[in-house]
Amino acid sequence: MLHDPAQLDLMFQALADPARRQMVDRLSRGPASVTQLAEPLAMSLSAVVQHLNLLEASGLVRTQKVGRVRTCQIEPKALRAAEHWINERRLSWERRLDRLGDFLAETKDEN
Amino acid sequence: MIERSVVHSTFIIERLYPAAPSKVFFALSNADAKRRWFTDPDNPMPGRFQMDFRIGGKEVNAGGPKDGPIHVYTATYQDIVPDQRIVYSYAMLFGETRISVSLATIELFADGKGTRLVLTEQGAFLDGHDTSSSREHGTGVLLDLLGAFLNEKT
Amino acid sequence: MTEPSVTHATIVLERIYEASPARVFQALADPQARARWGTPSKNVDLVYDKADFRVGGLDISRCGPRGSLIYRVETRYIDIEPEQRIVSTELVCEGWNRLSVSLVTVELQPVGTSTRLVLTDQIAAFGGKDMIAGSQAGFSAALDNLAVELRHQPVDA
């Protein structure tokens, strides 16, 4: 999914906007219709749809039209448990090693 | 029966510290020093921290969010070469469930007046357990994507 | 002078055995069975000084050419799911020298009346790639021997 640099660019672009981040945040808690997504946002429905199209193009979000209702959800592949675990492990270490650096600087003159 | 699965992975992190290898090794091997940087200041419940730094010795870290299950890390030191290398295995438990088992290698190389630290972690992730409350928030998604991106680059 | 360094690798070996997961698991769990099939050849002996197959348990074994059991292995059992999975660490020493540490995962999956065994060895080897090739060859030969062991052992009553 993330092998394509162009795809990755789209993804970062998708997340670079506060309204889109808010939409992703809402969807990470469960699927929603376009109307539900639009509710807390101070913009026209067509603006919301534009944002949503960008999110879908980036692969972060998937939408499905059932009858007249368009339902949106987080693309499940983005949240695979194993990837999440390894990311947590790595990020946990990155933070720790940062703190180790701080500790070494603080105790520089201690014996 | 529970459907079993194991996902194996390896990642490497490197850092350069302006301190001698012996100082870095001290921070890694001395319990009082380690406690000052190893535990997460954002973690509201630092919990248990025990350390018996010798080959065959054990280290335990317990903690977790206030309203969540206790996370316990139990480690065994497998190999120690002073000022050069530490290898330990550890298991992560969330409540009663074993989430993962990993082998961590920390190597220290003198680099001018400083130290290059290389951490290699080889892990086995068990049964696809959901390990995070941060999944509920959008930041969890962002971190996943950033992390996956970093994985691709390694 | 070259700095000492650690070589990391992941070795994955797979076999299909014409035996139930229960029988394969038994052959993995029983130190007497392991002493029979666990060596790469008949000229290599494997002796258990200590055997404690349970989560948190420790095995201590020695192996090597007959009469010269120079390798000492400490196996620590971290996760055991009967008939499904064993996760352990193995520390291999020669005299005072520690040669490698491995995180070994053995997974058993039923395939019809047979069992698929997948062994993953995530190894941290000190002092070079020879240990990795050696570990791979050793495990591979042992898994071949396990097939022979399973054919000759009586079916469970």
Image: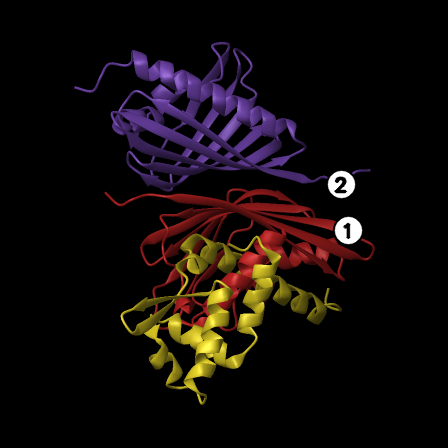
Chain colours: A yellow, B red, C purple
Q: Are marks 2 and 1 in contact (CB under 8 Å)?
A: yes
Residue C58 placement, left or right of B19: left
- Protein chain holding label 2: C
Q: Position of residue B18 (x, y in %)?
A: 76, 62
Q: Which residue is mark 2?
A: C3
Q: Amino acid at mark 1?
A: Ala
Tell me residue B68's x, y (percent): 34, 68
- Residue B29 position within the rendered picture, expressed as x and y whole percent measured from the top left: 61, 54
Q: In which quarter of the view is residue C30 placed?
A: top left
Residue designated by label 1: B110
Residue C17 relative to residue B45: left or right: left
**Residue at position x 66%, y 51% from top?**
B118
The chain ID associated with circle 1 is B
Rendering quarter of residue B73 = bottom left
Q: Is residue C41 above or below residue A64?
A: above
Q: CA distance from mark 2 to mark 1?
A: 9 Å
Query: Mark 2, residues whose alpha carbon is within 10 Å: few (<14), some, or many (≥20)?
Result: few
Q: Nearer the viewer, residue C21 or C56?
A: C21
Q: Secondary structure at mark 2?
A: loop
Q: Are marks 2 and 1 on the same chain?
A: no
